[in-house]
Amino acid sequence: MSGSDVILDVRGVSKSFGGLKAVQDFSLSLSQGGLKGLIGPNGAGKTTVFNLLTGVYRPDAGTVRLGGANLVGLRPCAIAEAGMARTFQNIRLFGQLSVLDNVRLACHLRSSGTMTGAVLGSVFARGQERAMTERARELLRLFDLADREDEEARNLPYGDQRRLEIARALATGPAVLLLDEPAAGMNPQEKVELRQLIRRVRQEFKVTILLIEHDMGLVMDVCERIAVLDYGQVIAEGTPAEVQSNPRVVEAYLGEAPAEAGHA
Amino acid sequence: MDQLLQTLKDGIAIGSLYALIALGYTMVYGILKFINFAHSDVVVLGAWLSLLFARKLEAVTGWGAPPWWAGALVLILAMAACALAGFCIERLAYKPIRGAPRLNVLITAIGVSLFLQNMGQQEWMFGTRPANIPALVNDATLFTVGRVNFTLLDAAGVGTALALMVGLEWLVFHTKIGRGMRAVSHSTATASLMGVPVNRVISTTFVIGSALAAAGGFLWALKYSQIKQTADTSWTLLGLKAFVAAVVGGIGNVRGAMLGGLAIGMLEMFGAAYLWSSMTDVYVFGLLIAVLLLRPGGILGKAVVEKV
Ligand SMILES: Nc1ncnc2c1ncn2[C@@H]1O[C@H](COP(=O)(O)OP(=O)(O)OP(=O)(O)O)[C@@H](O)[C@H]1O
Ligand SMILES: [Mg+2]
């Protein structure tokens, strides 16, 4: 991985909750267009890493650089604007908003009209609206949700909600996409489709992806590189094959559910 | 028949006024989950500023009969001034304590309310004596049904309120800022992560709510022409009723506030016309109790199921 094409560079990030060191001296770099997995047993600190990267929590120490700019201390909306988008382990759609509005809302970020412009109701703002609606519909088509655009998001089946979250994140026009357990709660068929979807998204949107996932089959299949987190620390980093044969990783997963430990 | 028509007319007139004010309560609650007790004082500010602007305009133009645009100009000025006041209140009083426990915010709101009331009583502001607003509409009877007159003033009042509500409805459901408001209302944290500038959305909410409050104050002044001092209890009652309207409709719900306002206005007028006219407040607060008992989320509100 050469230094020049590194898009996300995280160095020495730590976060404690009271006495609990949820993340310790976490470092990670993502190369432009790469797809990296972030795995680890339950409670290892994976979601906390996402929260630190997106500004939900402020790191106690360390730097997060996206395309060279340090993001530490910025508000979440500024970090989103800088090009970081995410989905949530516990789905966090705007349940009462329509499917279309969930995506359109995220399109705001990359549309040039100001919010206050809409108050004045200018013709310009109306053109903006049309452009955003168009973009949102395109995304929904790609995610196979086009025919449900008027439904309230909370009424969608679980798998659809997960895909809608990805569509919404992409609508913010990110450089880096953080997916937090996108396959959780999906049936096997949906999981197969998700693999294809992730690959497609990566190609069509030219985004760099960091993927948290417990489904080892999926992780080993789609990720080029994998970082393993245990007790808030990175204990291994490498290709799927390297990680699987790493004794520390096997040890970390001992005592985990057999299905997961078996893959790792 | 005449009485029915007259009562309907009065109900719509006062109901649309309540609705305008209720919108401010409901929008702020929807986004910040607190009751802005200073909202009714912005209504009062709107009424008094309308009076001041109207007097200035009268002095400058020296009109015998007010020109047709006088009302519109005063309304716009009052709305703009109150919008600015709302912006400042949010910035100076509420923003610094965002995230503080709810009780702190509530006490701050009461503080802002007292501040505005006492400021208004100062001689260099509005003083403590009631004042009369100059006529802003060259009133005339438009048409008569039975023995019920429909005047230009009636039409202007209801028309203004309706136009503002239609405008707000469009804003909330068909524009970027409205979508931002609905998202922030659902979850501030998630909205921020999706790039919504939360602070700007909150500011805009206060600006819009306060502008609508000013319109409410303006219409009140137009309707009753005499304006009481800023700490008068009649203002508190007006604010309370508008708040009840917001709760009855379903607090946090924009359409609910409009519906609740009309419901309260109708209830008052029908109760006064057909039952006892001295008990209008009892009907209003009786309805509040009934709604809270039977449908605590309000007419359009959804039952909130506590997540465990
Ligand atoms: N806001 C918080 N306050 C206190 N402790 C927290 C907070 N957020 C996370 N933790 C703790 O930090 C540790 C790491 O949690 P985190 O959610 O990051 O784990 P995870 O790797 O995502 O686990 P899972 O695979 O179960 O999703 C856990 O022990 C968790 O209880
Ligand atoms: Mg997690």
Image (spheres, coloured by chain):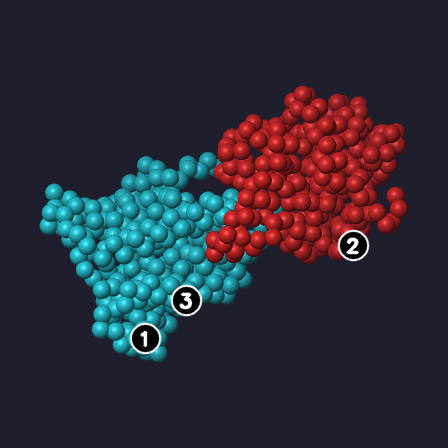
Chain colours: A red, B cyan
Of tags 1 and 3, which is closer to the observer?
A: 1
Q: In this rendering, is residue A230 above or below B83? A: above
Mark 3, chain letter? B
Quarter of the image for residue A174 reads top right
Residue drawn at (35%, 66%) of the image: B73
- Give the CA distance from mark 2 to mark 3: 44 Å
Structural crowding at the residue carrying mark 1, measured as other residues with C-alpha within 10 Å and reported as few (<14), some (14–19) or many (≥20): few
Q: Which one is in front, B175 or B216? A: B175
Tell me the number on the disc at residue B291. Answer: none
Could you say where residue B269 lies in the image, as x and y percent from the top left? 20, 49
Residue drawn at (75%, 56%) of the image: A70
Q: Which residue is mark 1?
A: B56
Could you say where residue A235 lies in the image, as x and y percent from the top left? 83, 39
Q: Which one is in front, A241 or B48? A: B48
Q: Secondary structure at mark 1?
A: helix
Of tags 1 and 2, which is closer to the observer?
A: 1
Q: Is residue A246 visible?
A: no
Whether callout 2 and callout 3 share a subunit is answered no
**Residue type, mark 3 in image:** Ala
Could you say where residue A127 lies in the image, as x and y percent from the top left? 54, 48
Q: Which one is in front, B173 or B230? A: B173
**Residue type, mark 2 in image:** Gly
Tell me the number on the disc at residue B81. Answer: 3
Screen quadrant of the N terminus of chain B? top left
Q: Is residue B84 left or right of residue A176?
A: left
- Give the CA distance from mark 1 to mark 2: 57 Å
Mark 1, chain letter? B
Q: Which residue is mark 2?
A: A68
- Give the CA distance from mark 1 to mark 3: 15 Å
Residue drawn at (45%, 59%) of the image: B207
| Label located before the other in sequence (1 or 3) | 1
